[in-house]
Image (tube, grey):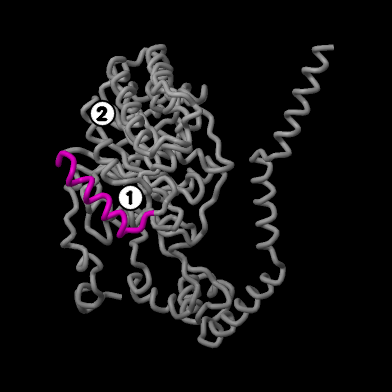
Amino acid sequence: MELREPIERLIRDPKEFTRSIPFPDPHELRLYDETLRDGEQMPGVCYTPAQKYEIATVLAEIGVHIMSVGFPAASAGDRATLQLVMEGKRRGELGDVEIVVMCRSNRSDIDITVQTLREAGIDPREVTFFIFTSGSDLHLKYKIGKMLLRFEGREESEWLDLPLEFYRNANVRLQCDAIAHARACGVERIEFGGEDGSRGDVDYFINHFKAGLQAGGTRPSWPDTVGTLTPEATRWYCSRIVRALPRELPIVAHLHNDYGLGTANAIAATSCGFKVISVTANGYGERAGNVKLHEYTVAMKMLYGIEIPGFKYNKLRDLARFMERMSGVPMQQHEPIIGTKVFAHESGIHTHAMLIDRRMYEAVPSELVGGATSFVFGKHSGVALVEETLRRRRDQLDAAGVELTSSLAHAVTEEIKRLREERAEARSGEQAMALYEDAMRHQMLDEQDVLEVALALGAKAGALAS
């Protein structure tokens, strides 16, 4: 049906309430994808280097700007991934995407990564090094405190007695030493930051960032490692960090989704002037995952009017299905934007309206993200949709000598409802979930697997010794 009035007169545009928010220029925004690093830390997920390269090509195609490929010092697989990715980038298969590798704030991690690059004929200047440490006082003293003592040449016996200020200062010196060492090894692009930033002291982080920049760092990263930020807290922290650092500086917001606020916090950080937002495909990541690429990009476009230049929104649903196959982890069918049934309708009240205009019940245009409106029939179906469906199949009814009447449409509707309730009694959903959970158990290793490996290796060692 063609509407007589402009759509703007019939419904309010959500951007009416967001137009005054001062976002950075969209051309300065960068999507920082961490699917290959944080995404693989999701329990039960594991990719081979070849799979990671395949994922990297798909992510580059959709339009991410920055891509973390893992932790070369910690894994031979990540070293192989780095080599594959850089070789592909040289062949032009990844476009202009920026490649990031992760290192702890120690010289050994940096040396191993530089060596991996040079063995593959890759200049360290072609890669960004993310050199990280800790940030909150909880992490500084109780997670890496003993390491900071060794770095400072102090005795481990002093661990619990030294004040927090000692650990803060030692941590800055540690990070600056690592940044300077990377620079001496020929690295030119250095991202840096400390875990658990959202539970740390903002003034400490500002001083930490300034010291890191002076040491040769080029891009600060501020993380909400355990996802405790609210949009209000995000604005409080991010506005202060942006004001304290050079205006043109790109700052990374690395946010987690433990309370389901990842996207809201990412938008809040962007509105404060953070220009680099860390995301993962399907939101995969440890615990509740990371900021979801599909939510952030589409919400920014549709609710705030900020379109990421060059980003292929229409590939989001294809990316979602691809990542499900690669990871073995399906998204819920009603996942915003990419869920398999998010553009499907069953309720009679809704479907009747959808036949008039899709915007009655679809705020996200399905075609924008590569989807299409569809209808499902069941106990909530209305006769209007059934009759419209039969009308579209009228040639088949006519061929069978069946006349389409109102009474037939009503009879079909009632029979559909009966069939759906009959199928519900079969409890096939429970069977499907049992099969999925069993498959996931076989994909992951648990404590029993650890014990069995230990017993097998121990028995083998004992046999060799005898």
Side of 228 where 20 appears, left or right: left
Tag 1: residue type? Tyr
- Which quadrant of the figure contains the N terminus? bottom left
**Which residue appears at 35% of the width and 70% of the height?**
358
**Boundaries of the magenta span:** 229-247
Mark 2 sits on what residue?
217
Q: Is residue 246 magenta?
A: yes
In terms of depth relative to the viewer, which is nearer, 327 or 155?
155
Cα distance between the residues tagged 2 and 1: 33 Å
When the figure is inspected, residue 178 is found, relative to residue 319, above or below; the finding is above
Side of 386 where 166 appears, left or right: left
Residue 191 placement: quadrant: top left
Q: Is residue 50 among what the camera can see?
A: yes
In terms of depth relative to the viewer, which is nearer, 205 or 221?
205
Q: Secondary structure at mark 1?
A: helix
Residue 449: percent from left, percent from top:
71, 36
Residue 250: percent from left, percent from top:
22, 39
Side of 13 where 110 appears, left or right: right
Q: Residues within 10 Å of mark 2 (few under 14, many from 20)?
A: many
Q: Nearer the viewer, mark 2 or mark 1?
A: 2
Mark 1 sits on what residue?
313
